Amino acid sequence: MSTCQQCNAQFEITGQDLQFYDEVSPVFSGKKYLIPEPKLCPDCRQQRRLTWRNEIRFWKRKCDATGVSMLSMYPPEAKLPVYENDYWLSDKWDAMEYGRDFDFNRPFFEQFQELRDQVPIYALGVLKPSMENSDYCNQAGYLKNCYLVFNTDNAEQCLYGKAINHCFNCVDCYKTTQCQSCYETMHSTNCSFSTHLYNCETCDDCHFGSNLIGCSHCFGSTNMHSKQYYFFNEKLDKAVYENKVAEMRNKMSDQEIFKKFQEFQKTKPTRWMLGIQNENTTGNYISQSKDCTECYDSEFLEKCKYCFDVKKSPEPCFNNHDINYFGLGIKNSYEALSIGYEANHVLFGFDIWPSAESTYCGYCTHNSQYIFGCAGLKKKEYCIFNKQYSKEDYEKLAGRIAEHMQKTNEWGEFFPAALSPFAYNQATALDYFPLTKDEVIAKGWRWQDEKTEIPKVERIITFDKLSVLDDITKVPDEILKWAIECKETKRPFMIQKLELEFYRKMNLPIPHFHPDVRYQNRLKLRQPRKLYHRVCDHEGCQVEFDSAYSPSDSQKVYCEKCYQEVIE
């Protein structure tokens, strides 16, 4: 067992891990530069990577090339130059102009930071030509009429969503696919006109449900296949069902109903892992994968370990360890963040697509390959620190730098969190590894205090008067000119026109909480990215498995065979 140098936790490095490190270790001038065993545990390695990614926060700043005001995922205090996306993609500038020699008297990371802080970067992580009327979105592509949608491809008329791929007219959803007119729905596929669903598939007009497949007109129900008119797992006639639903909605708020549903759900078993069509695979929220270990929120992986939020493509993502985002055919890569589109053999890099043979690089795109320590390159090869070399000279110098990094103990480690352009509370790391300001500072990382902007509006509805918003039929159009004070944080927020139309169509009340609070509440509903060894809770069954449900959790957890036996 190894001891994590950051949190002191014990973690295992297996023989298969060592074989993987050997397989992907780069070869320069015929010599292999072996990737050493990691010094941090898997959780701390993931946390470090996620300090380099921001998805949901925006700032207004000027393009450092044109002076045009723009939205950026980089805060003003981040000193690196930021270009508007169209300008960054153009031929009006060349990242090679910032090329420099490597200084063997100084650490690698220190020199890379200096390069990174001078090479311009794109303002948002979006495919700009594919975005239509979707300015306030990030880490996304092919969106139309969307607002505050993140980590998403192919969505239309969606608001406040993350990973809502191929969805239409959905609000406040998280990791849903091919859904239409859904609200507060998570980890669900092909559902429509439904609200408050969790891990459901092909459901219509279902509300407050979990683990439903092929159901319609079900309310407060769980663990059912192909059912209609069920109220808290009780079969009812259509008229009785409708009366029961109307009666509960008249007496209780959505929050109260959801709490009641959560209590009911605890009385029913759940399956050991959320996912389908897996073979020899552990993790959670993973599907169609083979021979994978502790992978989460991913599809179509093979021979992968510690991979998160990796998207499906026609070919599986193959032979990768320690990857966060975004997938689509990546291969033979290690300790990387936001790489994709068939990126191959990316080691210790971030924002690399679709490129190959990249080592310790960032923001390099458009089929750059054989690059080492570069930033912002497009369509380049055999470059080191943004300087061009012949193939032979590249191989020699890359090997020398790898040997230098071995001596400085940098070789085999991802970029330090302290060098990220984002403060910890601005980065995605905060979502999965929450820390207080004092804890962050104690680690030597940055925390950025931010002021709440007060919208310039005609009226602010305070949290003690939010009940006036509960009957959507009585909410006037003027609400679009008002701000609502969040019931929890008192931070004001506004309602969008498309959003108001959605609430009216779905007969939903105006939310009482700021979108950021609603997002954090959804994250709390998920199981952590951590596995516990358990035994099936079904009486008489002794099947053992690794599950994201802690043994201290009161939820009954069944193995696959026992779970299928209790499905209604």
Image (cartoon, rainbow, N blue to C red):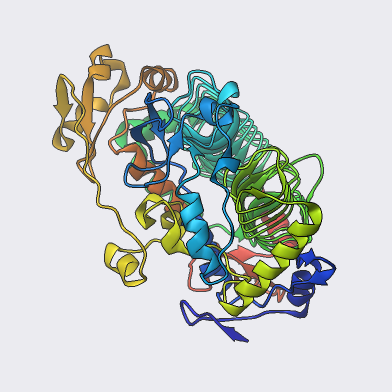
Q: Residue at x 75, y 40 (%)?
A: 313
Instruction: List the single residue furthest toward the right.
Output: 30
Q: Residue 409: percent from the left, percent from the top?
A: 57, 77
Q: Position of residue 547 (x, y in %)?
A: 62, 66
Q: Is residue 62 left or right of residue 238?
A: left
- Decide if residue 424 is on the left or right side of residue 378: left
Determine whether 213 is above or below 137 in the image: below
The residue located at (50%, 50%) in the rendering is 116
Q: Is residue 399 visible?
A: yes
Q: Residue furthest top?
A: 477
The residue shown at (16%, 27%) is 460
Question: Which of these two is toward me, 123 or 374?
Answer: 374
Instruction: State which quarter of the image contains the N terminus.
Output: bottom right
Q: Is residue 132 above or below residue 492?
A: above
Measuring from the top left, give residue 272's x and y in whole percent.
Answer: 64, 62
| Percent position of residue 33, x then y | 74, 72
Lateral position of residue 361 relative to residue 562, left or right: left
Pick the front one: 218 or 53: 53
Q: In the rendered image, is residue 326 in sight?
A: no
Q: Nearer the viewer, residue 568 or 111?
A: 111
User: Total marks drawn?
Assistant: 0
Farthest residue to the bottom: give it. 1
